[in-house]
Amino acid sequence: MNRRQLIAAGLAATAAPLPAATPREDWQALAGEVKAAMRFAFAAYRQIAWGQDEVKPVSGGGQSFLIPGASVGLSIVEALDTLWLMGLDAELEDAVRWIHQRLTFDLDGDAQVFEASIRLVGGLLSGHLATGDARLLELAHDLASRMMPCFETPTGMPMRYVNLRTGKTRDGQSFPAEIGGGMAPEYVTLSRLTGERRFADKAVAAMLALHARRSKIGLVGDTIDVTTGQWVGRRATVGPPTDSYLEYLWDTWRLTGDVRCRDAYRVETAAILARMADRTTGDLWFANVDFETGAKLSLRQSELSAYYGGLLSEGGDHDAGVAAMTGWIAAQDRYGVLPEAFDPTDWRVLAPTNALRPELADGAFTLWLHDRDERWRHVVAKHFRLMIAKNKAPHGFSGLKDVRTGAQDDACPGYWWSEQMKYYWLIFSDTKRFDYKDNYLSTEGNVLKGLRR
Ligand code: IFL
């Protein structure tokens, strides 16, 4: 849709879409607070859970994430480019040293391909791009190579799990985000850096195989059997488990110039704007609908959908992107830390947890990269200050069991190190280490383009 069509459909931003600019802020001072929070959390992790996938920030200790009982230093890998961007050089040196000495993927365990790709392959690649360290690239290559058997299916869409030692795969009932959103930019980057095309070829083909199975109205369902190509779940959504697929259609076009990905993104986005945009509350939300009929199923919003305004803007629909963000800003004003799910029709909380989610900061940061409207910085500043007020724990930052009571859940997911801490830093600091005009951040916040060494 062009701007005229958007206005006709009532999707373009109307007057005063963002909160009025609030009092002047000292952004550099705020950047300093972000860096101090990162330094504090990293020191605590270093002391009590070094090498574990995740720190337990309330009780102390750590836990594995990818493979039960076998940590691969996930938080270390996810923190790499954030530490580099912040100039936390001593911490970065410790992190790279641990990886050199301890990290191996020769493990007899089943890794979830999506998580291993966006977090570990992506984290090692952005760490390599930041530091120039060859071992980080070798490890990304080793892990991705171990996971390649996942693509050996009749459709070319990946199985969900693969044993890192034996290559045995399992679980063919998968989701758009895990099929198309789990790999392409990471694997395209890996192919570019190693000269081995097989990674990019398989990942892009998988994403396009999913797109080829869209319905007549241009939407994908939420669950598909990758061994038969048959849909199992009929719900079309911009949230999980579809979110990263939509991001990676556009992102792969941006990184590779592959017009098939651009065209696929355009077809699906036009269908989403036409069939899922919902103005019943006054704000622009995206409903969950049946992927073949377009019939509305619910207006339930997952917090993870807050990224979508940023994606619309990146894809050229900036006004719709701004409009898509206004409801999320109202939600932050209403709830403080957002609940995992709510219904904007009456603001009922449907799931009260918040696993330290970054998506609102992600969406606002992406919009700011496009229009430099200072008000996005205020949205992100509020997100950061809420985190300091509600999520700070004795040994780092913790998710919440219930945003209404503030009870903490004693977990700090790996993405915290890669995502919001980076978005906060980049939007406040104006660091010279980042190219604000020409960059690419993955679904996990890994900077695969735009690091200035
Ligand atoms: O892993 C993170 C990433 O942004 C993603 N899905 C969920 C996580 C953050 O909420 O793609």
Image: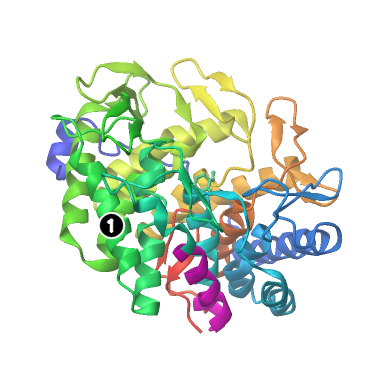
Residue 35 image-quadrant placement? bottom right
Q: Residue at x 23, y 41 (%)?
A: 269
Can residue 315 be seen in this snapshot? no
Main secondary-structure element of the magenta-colored stretch: helix
Q: Is residue 267 above or below residue 218?
A: below
Q: Which residues are magenta?
A: 128-145
* Visible residue check, residue 101: yes
Magenta stretch contains residue 142: yes
- x, y (%) of residue 100? 67, 77
What kind of residue is marked 1?
A: Val
Q: Nearer the viewer, residue 418 or 299?
A: 418
Which percent across, then down, holds residue 170?
Answer: 47, 41
Residue 133 coordinates in the image, percent (x, y): 57, 83
- Residue 14 position in % (x across, y down): 29, 36
172 relative to 151, above or below? above
Residue 267 is a magenta residue: no
Q: Residue at x 20, y 23 (%)?
A: 292
Q: Quadrant of the N terminus?
A: top left
The colouring scheme, among rainbow, by chain, secondary structure or one colour, is rainbow
Picture residue at 74% right of the left edge, 75% below the top: 94
Observer-nearest residue: 290 or 32?
A: 290
Q: Is residue 391 left or right of residue 24?
A: right
Which residue in the protein does label 1 denote?
204
Left or right, 120 with respect to 225, comes to right
Q: Tell me the residue at 74%/56% (across/down).
A: 52
Quadrant of the rendered structure where residue 243 is? Answer: top left
Q: Residues within 10 Å of mark 1 (few under 14, many from 20)?
A: many
Q: Camera-side residue: 450 or 200?
A: 200
